[in-house]
């Protein structure tokens, strides 16, 4: 599997922004890992373990089932998107990186296609001066697109823009439905690398 794949699906940017606009500022929770960022990095959980509205991180060591939070009920289009990925969806969150904020280079835990669990990013609000680097290579994402990045690899973010960047971020298991969402050549590449 390539480390970066743009999925062949797009979403309605106006509807994404309508759902986003309906959520209160007070619903966002500051990210706890302050060693990895400077500025404003905050999270609004839409699906979490136990449906807790304050549980911002899909901790692989936790036990319990994922469930919708109270915030997802307020967002019909987010619900439609999440349901569209099927029963493989575990967590779903809004990740907001404030203007002028930086997330330093780090790796996440077992979030590669080959691990059987992936993280998808759908930009809702972004700007040309938002930099996302994976393995030191810049990835340019546009609003309404859907991207897989292998976050096992080193990655960093830099919001040099004057606006807050917001992504809908969905963690899901790799099942047949998710595999079918990827371009065929990507799945063939993954199957070859696993064999």
Image (cartoon, grey):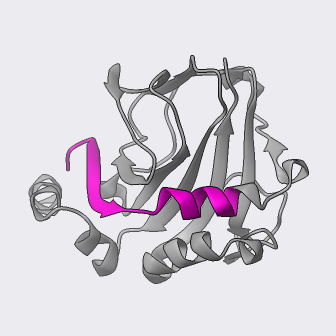
Residue 166, quarter of picture:
top right
Residue at the spot 55% in from the left edge and 54% down from the top edge: 169
Q: Tell me residue 129's x, y (percent).
A: 49, 21
Q: Nearer the viewer, residue 122 or 195?
A: 122
- The stretch drawn in magenta includes residue 3: yes
Residue at the spot 40% in from the left edge and 42% down from the top edge: 142
- The stretch drawn in magenta includes residue 170: no
Residue 160, quarter of picture:
top right
Q: Tell me residue 103's x, y (percent).
A: 60, 24
Q: Tell me residue 179's x, y (percent).
A: 26, 70
Residue at the spot 75% in from the left edge and 77% down from the top edge: 73
Asked whether, in this view, residue 111 is left or right of residue 175, the answer is: right
* Residue most extreme to the right: 26
Q: Tell me residue 190's x, y (percent).
A: 17, 57
Asked whether, in this view, residue 1 is left or right of residue 17, the answer is: left
The answer to whether residue 21 is visible is yes
Asked whether, in this view, residue 110 is left or right of residue 42, the answer is: left
Considering the image in quadrants, where does the C terminus appear? bottom left
Residue 11, quarter of picture:
bottom left
| Relative height, residue 74 to residue 11 (above, below) | below
The answer to whether residue 104 is visible is no
Q: How many marks?
A: 0
Magenta extent:
1-20
| Relative height, residue 40 to residue 169 (above, below) | above
């Amino acid at each position: 599997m390539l480390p970066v794949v743009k999925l062949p699906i797009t979403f309605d940017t106006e509807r994404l922004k309508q759902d986003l606009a309906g959520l209160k500022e007070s619903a966002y929770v500051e990210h706890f890992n302050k060693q990895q960022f400077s500025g404003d990095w905050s999270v609004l959980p839409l699906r979490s373990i136990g449906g807790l509205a304050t549980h911002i991180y899909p901790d692989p060591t936790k036990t319990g089932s994922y469930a919708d939070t109270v915030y997802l009920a307020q967002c019909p289009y987010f619900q439609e998107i999440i349901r569209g990925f099927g029963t493989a969806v575990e967590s779903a969150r809004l990740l907001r990186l404030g203007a002028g904020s930086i997330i330093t280079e780090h790796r996440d835990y077992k979030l590669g296609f080959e691990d059987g669990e992936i993280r998808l990013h759908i930009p809702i609000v972004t700007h040309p001066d938002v930099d996302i680097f994976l393995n030191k290579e810049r990835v340019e994402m546009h609003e309404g697109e859907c991207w897989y990045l292998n976050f096992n690899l080193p990655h960093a973010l830099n919001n040099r823009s004057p606006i807050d960047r917001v992504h809908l971020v969905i963690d899901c298991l790799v099942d047949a439905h998710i595999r079918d969402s990827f371009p065929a050549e990507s799945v063939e590449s993954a199957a070859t690398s696993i064999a």
